[in-house]
Image (tube, rainbow, N blue to C red):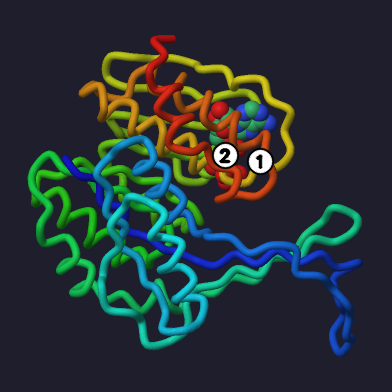
Amino acid sequence: MRVYVVGNITVDENWAIADIPTKGSSVHGNKVSQDIGGKGANQAILLSRCGIDTTLIAAIGHDVNGQWITKKMRDETLRVLPAALFSGNSDTSLIFNCADGDNAIITTTTAADSLSLETLTQALKDAVPGDVMLMQGNFTFDKTRSLFQLAKSRGMTTVFNPSPVKPEFALLWPWVDIAVLNQLEAEELQPVGVKNLVITQGAKGATLATQTDQAFCPAVAAQAVDTTGAGDTFLAVMLASSLLRGTGIDPLSLAHASQAAAITVGRPGTYSAFPVAAELKSLLKRTT
Ligand code: ATP
């Protein structure tokens, strides 16, 4: 069984600035850090660190950032497709953190948008019934729907984390087996009829509704340093926990996910905050 994460991979640059510059002005700033980012990459990396056979389908550009991403991915155990690089730049997020705690983010999606349905379909050619396709909200509605339809026609299990949210995503529930949304996304997209529905509620916890289980899993208390990536950690570890035990999404998979997300929120950064394979292996052994 393999998980195909069809999404994006970015370079996230964190900058410290005094304040957001006004139009026409020039300000000093410091580049504080550079990390791997993108919801697709985050979730794929965490799944593979849990021991899941994972393929990330995401575009890497033909630039210095693309070389850096390729080198960083060699430290992980996942496979990245397509093998061919996108002829333009890799996707990048510039995160400007102001002295007052506010921030402003500029994100490109050119590389992710460059992946045609044909290329994505080709990257999924080895998928067999029982494999899993996990998507986020990175692609257009039409491309996202076509991929879910393709996955269902191949007998795959489909997982949808519709972030960033687009209103039309509310039409996709008939093709989704497992939906994971935060509270705001759930209010906007009203997931109805999904067999496995997980709604995360930040520091409060998360709820699960399946045909057999209704459960609330409180968050694990943590000294929150930076909550970015909590949702990606939660989703990946919840899915990995159920796949490794051969169960559906159950209360134990949410408990494992909450323990992993608490590790992520207790550390600065996103990729650099994620639990490592040894931490995940140990927490996935817990029975409560
Ligand atoms: P993000 O987009 O910031 O990655 P999200 O909005 O998708 O996150 P959240 O609902 O904020 O997802 O968080 C997912 C899970 O992470 C929660 O259900 C909870 O288990 C855990 N979590 C989030 N914030 C905290 C916190 N402050 N302390 C402990 N656990 C947390």
Circle 1 is placed at which residue position? 227
In this rendering, position of residue 176 left or right of residue 227: left
Give the alpha-carbon distance from disc 1 to disc 2, as whole Å. 6 Å
In this rendering, position of residue 41 left or right of residue 126: right
The image quadrant in which ligand 1 is located: top right
Residue 107 locus on image (x, y percent): 59, 70
Q: Residue furthest top?
A: 288
Q: Is residue 202 in view from this perspective?
A: no
Relative to 199, does residue 139 appear above or below in the rendering? below
Q: Quadrant of the C terminus?
A: top left
CB at mark 1 closer than 8 A to ligand 1? yes
The label on residue 115 is: none
Q: Quadrant of the N terminus?
A: top left
Dot 1 falls on a residue whose secondary structure is loop
Q: How many marks?
A: 2
Residue 135 locus on image (x, y percent): 34, 52
CB at mark 2 closer than 8 A to ligand 1? yes
Q: Amino acid at mark 1?
A: Thr
> Residue 210: which quarter of the image?
top left
Residue lying at 12% horizontally and 52% vertically, measured from the top left: 127
Residue 180 locus on image (x, y percent): 42, 38
In this rendering, position of residue 165 left or right of residue 28: left
Residue lying at 40% horizontally and 27% vertically, measured from the top left: 281
Dot 2 falls on a residue whose secondary structure is helix
Residue lying at 8% horizontally and 48% vertically, measured from the top left: 128
Circle 2 is placed at which residue position? 230
